[in-house]
Image (cartoon, rainbow, N blue to C red):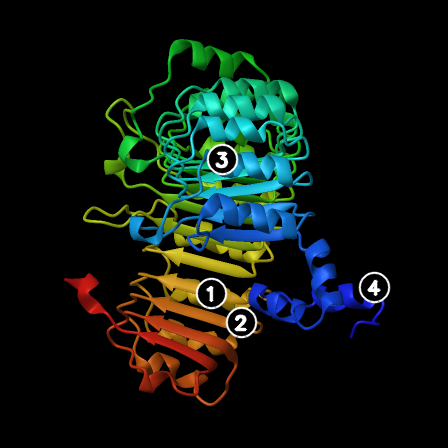
Amino acid sequence: MEGLPDPLVWEILNRIKRTADRNSVSLSCKHFHNLDNEQRQFLRVGCGLDPPNEALTSLCNRFPNLTRVEITYSGWMSKLGKQLDNQGLFILSNYCPSLSDLALSYCTVITDEGLSYLSSCSKLSALKLNFTPRITGCGILSLVVGCKNLTILHLIRCLNVSSVEWLEYLGKLETLEDLTIKNCRAIGEGDLIKLGQSWRKIKRLQFEVDANYRYMKVYDRLAVDRWQKQCVPCENMLELSLVNCIISAGRGLACVLGKCKNLEKIHLDMCVGVRDCDIVSLARKSKNLRSISLRIPSDFSFPVYLNNPLRLSDESLKALAQNCPMLESIKISFSDGEFPSFSSFTLCGIVSLIQKCPVKELSLDQVYSFNDIGMQALCLAQYLEKLELVRCQEITDEGLHLVSQFSRLRILRLFKCLGVTNDGLKPLLGSYKLELLAVEDCPQISERGMVGAARSISFRQDLSWMF
């Protein structure tokens, strides 16, 4: 063991993925231990650090080449000891010269002072903050001023980040490629215009507004003017995810949808105000689109100042079918609750997508227009591998019988579908055509009726949703 050449030991260590196993093998001999210390690049710590600063110092000394560190206190309670504080980030900045990726989750005692220590980490390119309530916009600004190679920034539930000067500074640097802002109450859609020319570099944008504070930040006149006057280049955008956003003509993110010529994946979830012309413009520009997910809000989701909101119609679906020849993943759902939406997507529009696009994955949630005729159309979807039907109440056993004719289907999921029974699965019994059949909360299907319909089955029955 001691005489094995270093390249062979590195190959062995690279094949061991679990941290516990890496720790065990490093104890087998001194040679392995030393090389593991040199090679270890990722460290994940949290509640087990006791006392935290001393323990972190020891770990940093043992693993001098760390490039990625994750500190998480999910599930932490005071009886578990103290959390890592600002001094811990000072230790990282001094003992980890190669640090390039840092993630902090539920670190409730770290403040702007701690982030300021990280500004000396010249190689830091990725920072991810999840529920760090004491950090403000001033702390983030101090970090981005020092870390000029930052390409990835994730802010999730950072409730006290109100000032957005850091966005403007990042816009001038033009280094940012991946930006995630979720449930940061004081940051609105209009603030993103401050990214300026950095829009040209961004490849991935996820922006989610806290649903309870959706209308808290109202567009001011200056923000509207800046969106309309400033060119927003998005040539490199590959993935775009917007949740609970207000999208209005000529404002904010509506200016982005029609300019992403290389977009591959888009997710619009409960985005109020999206119009057919927005989706048509997106489809015509994004010829490389591979995945689209639409969750449509009900009429009751629209604020009072958006009079007579226009629903999305088949015009959007037909534009996608005609302009996106690579579209392979489609998810369409309508908001549930006491007042569900009534789809303005007809069966004709959905079938046009199925017929003209190489659809591999199709998920429909509460799409009332999809019925047995739609299932018949899926018989011609020669690339379809995964089908998910949620609360599609117009599908009966007659439509479910057709599943056995879907040439490439491997995964079928049925959730809360009232019209299907055990009889609908009979053509599949004994064939083991499917790799997975998952049924949840369908009152007329039993676990016994699924046996033999797939290599693997998953069953759950909870009918409380019906009452």
- Lateral position of residue 199 relative to residue 227, left or right: right
What residue is disc 2 on?
Answer: 409
Distance of label 1 from label 4 (alpha carbons):
46 Å
Callout 2 amino acid: Leu
Crowd tier of the residue under label 2, counting other residues whose Cα lies within 10 Å: few below 14, some 14–19, many 20 or above: many
Disc with the residue nearer the chain's start (1 vs 4)? 4
Q: Which mark is residue 87?
A: 3
Callout 1 amino acid: Leu
Distance of label 2 from label 1 (alpha carbons):
8 Å
Asked if labels 4 and 1 touch by Cβ distance under 8 angstroms, the answer is no
Q: Which mark is residue 7?
A: 4
**Residue drawn 45% across the image and 23% down it:** 137
What residue is disc 1 on?
Answer: 387
296 or 104, which is in the foreground? 104
Residue situated furthest bottom in the rendering? 430
- Lateral position of residue 456 relative to residue 1, left or right: left
Distance of label 3 from label 1 (alpha carbons):
51 Å
**Residue drawn 58% across the image and 66% down it:** 18
